[in-house]
Structures are given as structure tokens and as C-alpha cells.
Amino acid sequence: MGQQQLLLIVLGVIIVGIAVVVGISVFTASSSNANRDAVIADLTTLASMAQQYYRKPIAMGGGSNSFDASTGSGGTAWDIPDQLDTTANGTYTATVSAQSVTLVGTGNEKGEDGTNPVKVTMVVGPNSITSTTINN
């Protein structure tokens, strides 16, 4: 083969190598973003469930205007249902007080730092939900 053909083969291999590296990088970023969005969706569902609990009377299995059922007698605090504390998207924990629930979702994919997983914190109040993303 001539020098020109060898040069074209080497150039082709370099271009394909660069394309593979860029593709892997884009895929990793995309999977991290998708996991973050899925964790946020799961936390939003849990937040909605907590707000429903807050509004229901204790007689109907709710908290009677309290997340920890401190306003009534015989109630129990809101908690994440057993089947939803771990999903395909991540694991979830809740810290409950009378007027707020702090939900923490830890995803299955590594975040922007490449070491720690995606993590989202959501604070649920009687009429509001505030979300904070840690390590996108």
C-alpha cells in the first residue's frame, strides 16, 4: 500500500476513536440526567402522598392538618410506603415534623462529580413543595 492509503487509514481510525469517546461521554451525561429526572418524579409522587395525608382527618387514616399526626389522637406519622422506599430509580428517606416533610432521594447513577450518586432533597409543606438537586 502507498503512503497516502496508510495515512487515510490512520486518519480514519483516529476519527472513529474520537467519535466513540464523545459518544460515551454524551451517553453518561444523558443517563445521569435521566436518573435525576426520574428521582425528582418519584419524590414529587411521594410529596403528593404526604400532602394528601396532611389534609385527611385521622378517622380516614390521615394526619388532620399535621404530617406527624400531632394535632389529633391515635394517629401515626406519615411515612414512605414500603414498596416505594426503593425503586429502580433510587432509594428514598423521609424526615417528618408537624408542618413539613423532608424527602431525600438518592439515585442509581453517578452525578456530575463522577463519584457520588445523584441526590435530590425535597421539602414538603402543607401548600408547597421545594426541590434542591445535589450533584446533578
Image (cartoon, rainbow, N blue to C red):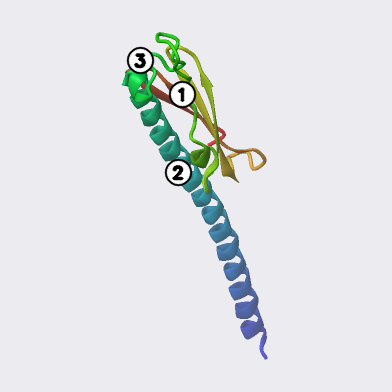
> Which residue appears at 52% of the width and 45% of the height?
87
Q: How far apart are marks 1 and 3 (CA)?
A: 11 Å
SS at mark 1 in the image = loop
x and y, in percent, of residue 130 in the image: 41, 23
Quadrant the N terminus occupies: bottom right
Q: How far apart are marks 3 and 2 (CA)?
A: 30 Å
At label 2, the amino acid type is: Ala
Label annotation for residue 129: none
The answer to whether residue 136 is left or right of residue 75 is: right
At label 1, the amino acid type is: Trp
> Which residue appears at 55% of the width and 58% of the height?
22
**What residue is disc 1 on?**
78
Asked if disc 1 and disc 3 are in contact, CB closer than 8 Å, the reply is no
| N-term mark: 2 or 1 | 2
Crowdedness of circle 2 by 10 Å Cα count: few (<14), some, many (20+)? some
x and y, in percent, of residue 136 in the image: 53, 37
x and y, in percent, of residue 55 in the image: 32, 19
x and y, in percent, of residue 43 in the image: 44, 34
**What residue is disc 3 on?**
64
**What residue is disc 2 on?**
38
Crowdedness of circle 3 by 10 Å Cα count: few (<14), some, many (20+)? many
Q: Give above or below for 31 relative to 79.
A: below
**For this rendering, which residue is in front, 26 or 66?**
66
The answer to whether residue 23 is left or right of residue 129 is: right
At label 3, the amino acid type is: Ser
Q: Distance between the residues labelled 2 and 1?
A: 22 Å
SS at mark 3 in the image = loop
